């Protein structure tokens, strides 16, 4: 029980990005014992044999926030403007929206109670009934 209380106090904010059928990225703000904050970025990939998930984490501390964001933005912009300027980067958002709409329609047709779309951003109070997001098993996203 004490471990559950510690985990709930530690995770302050969470956001996730579903990236295809097998990948999800979690962005979690965590609180240290010294009342400081850091970010964990977790890539969770469903294993092909359906035997759980493989996770990779990056720990990002406040002293690195600005340099990290600058380098990430520079790198993404380089790909978008120099390497692949004609690619439609919005296609993935459209596919996600279409998939969510098809699930809602399917639920309505089956008379099932449609699950409300999970918010992409949550706070500590939103997570009281569930484990930390980066530790949860995530469902597949079918394109």
Image (tube, rainbow, N blue to C red):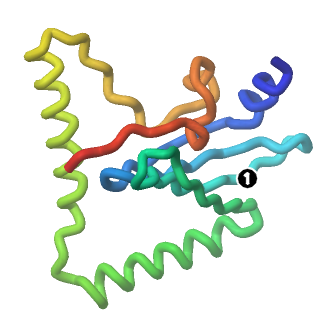
Instruction: Residue 2 in the image: state x and y as whole percent.
Output: 85, 21
Q: Give the answer, above or below, for where 3 lies relative to 35.
A: above
Q: Residue furthest toward the right?
A: 34
Instruction: Residue 123 in the image: state x and y as whole percent.
Output: 58, 31
At x 11% / y 25%, what residue is drawn?
105
Q: Is residue 84 toward the left or the right of residue 77 in the image?
A: left
Instruction: Mark 1: give few (<14), some (14-19) or many (20+) Cα within 10 Å.
Output: some
Q: Residue furthest toward the bottom?
A: 82
Q: Give the answer, above or below, for where 69 lies relative to 40.
A: below
Q: Is residue 106 toward the left or the right of residue 70 in the image?
A: left
Instruction: Residue 97 in the image: state x and y as whole percent.
Output: 20, 42
The image quarter in which residue 77 lies:
bottom left
Q: Is residue 7 toward the left or the right of residue 117 in the image?
A: right
Q: Give the answer, above or below, for where 133 lies relative to 2.
A: below
**Front in this rendered view, residue 138 or 79:** 138
Q: Secondary structure at mark 1?
A: strand
- Circle 1 sits on which residue? 38
At x 24% / y 52%, what residue is drawn?
93
At x 35% / y 83%, what residue is drawn?
79
At x 70% / y 60%, what residue is drawn?
59
**Front in this rendered view, residue 15 or 74:** 15
**Front in this rendered view, residue 135 or 66:** 135
The image quarter in which residue 55 lies:
bottom right
Q: How many marks?
A: 1
Image quarter of the N terminus: top right
């Amino acid at each position: 029980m004490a471990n559950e209380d510690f985990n709930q106090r530690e995770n302050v904010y969470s956001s996730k990005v579903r990236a295809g059928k097998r990948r999800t990225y979690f962005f979690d703000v965590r609180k240290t014992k010294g009342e400081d904050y850091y970010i964990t970025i977790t890539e969770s990939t469903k294993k092909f044999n359906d035997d759980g998930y493989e996770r990779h984490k990056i720990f990002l501390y406040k002293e690195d926030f600005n340099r990290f964001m600058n380098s990430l933005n520079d790198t993404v912009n380089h790909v978008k403007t120099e390497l692949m300027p004609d690619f439609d980067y919005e296609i993935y958002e459209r596919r996600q929206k279409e998939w969510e709409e098809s699930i809602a329609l399917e639920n309505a047709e089956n008379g099932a109670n449609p699950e409300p779309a999970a918010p992409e951003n949550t706070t500590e109070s939103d997570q009281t009934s569930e484990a930390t997001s980066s530790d949860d098993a995530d469902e597949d996203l079918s394109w």
